[in-house]
Image (spheres, rainbow, N blue to C red):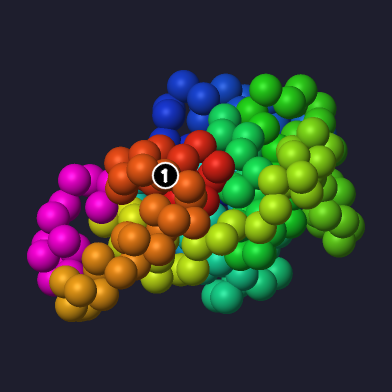
Amino acid sequence: MIRVLLAEDQSMVREALAALLNLEDDMEVVVQVSGGDEVLEAARIHAVDVALLDIEMPGLSGIEAAARLRRELPGVKVVIVTTFGRPGYLRRAMEYGADAFLVKDAPAAQLADAVRRVLRGEKVIDPTLAAAALSEGADPLTPRERDVLKAAAGGALNAEIARALRLSEGTVRNYLSTVIHKTGARNRSEAVRIAREKGWL
């Protein structure tokens, strides 16, 4: 029996996915969590084979949770299942150790098939997204630029971002200027919007 962890912050979606997967003869959802920061401990306690992770969750994102699982429990396979079919998310998910990346409107049979395939050592990627990721090109932002832009997304002032990230205000200004240039934006708000649309944030 394949033991599955399901991480999804919307309870109705989580319960529907769990019900569908539990109909499969060879798999069981043994634990459900609503936040990314609960994933590692739940996976360890329940000895899961596969973790199905949403991207947008409280605490850690699904991509960050995938990276933590890869480091701490490398035997657990990771399937990202998301509403946000953005090429940037796909690239980051695969870089951080995901084994599969599917969008939520895929048929339930496709999701169950992906779970089986990753356990056989295969990588499973939504083909439309794979093509879009190839044409989109790589995420141009460095991890530090992404941190600064995330902090700016909440409307924080440069001084507040500098304190939170332990940087000087001048360094924060430089990072934001670089990000604005890289995204082709006119200002930081537009840079945040563009980076979110591309899946870079």
**Which region is colored magenta?**
152-164
Relative to 156, 31 lies left or right: right
What residue lies at 56% left-to-right and 34% top-to-bottom? Answer: 84
Q: Amino acid at mark 1?
A: Ala
What residue lies at 79% left-to-right and 34% top-to-bottom? Answer: 128
Where, by quadrant of the figure, is residue 38 drawn? bottom left
- Residue 169 position in % (x across, y down): 16, 71
Relative to 87, 198 lies left or right: left
Helix, strand or loop at label 1? It is: loop
How many labels sit on residues?
A: 1
Residue 44 appears in the rendering: no
State the residue in front, 124 or 139: 139
Relative to 173, 84 lies left or right: right
State the residue in front, 46 or 70: 70
Q: Callout 1: few (<14), some (14-19), or many (20+) C-alpha neighbours within 10 Å?
A: some
What residue lies at 67% left-to-right and 23% top-to-bottom? Answer: 105
- Residue 18 position in % (x across, y down): 60, 31
Residue 187 appears in the rendering: yes
96 shown above or below 89: below
Q: Which residue is mark 1?
A: 185
- Residue 15 position in % (x across, y down): 52, 26
| Magenta-span inclusion, residue 162 | yes
What residue lies at 55% left-to-right and 42% top-to-bottom? Answer: 198
Relative to 137, 125 lies left or right: right
- Residue 181 position in % (x across, y down): 44, 56
Q: Main secondary structure of the magenta part?
A: helix
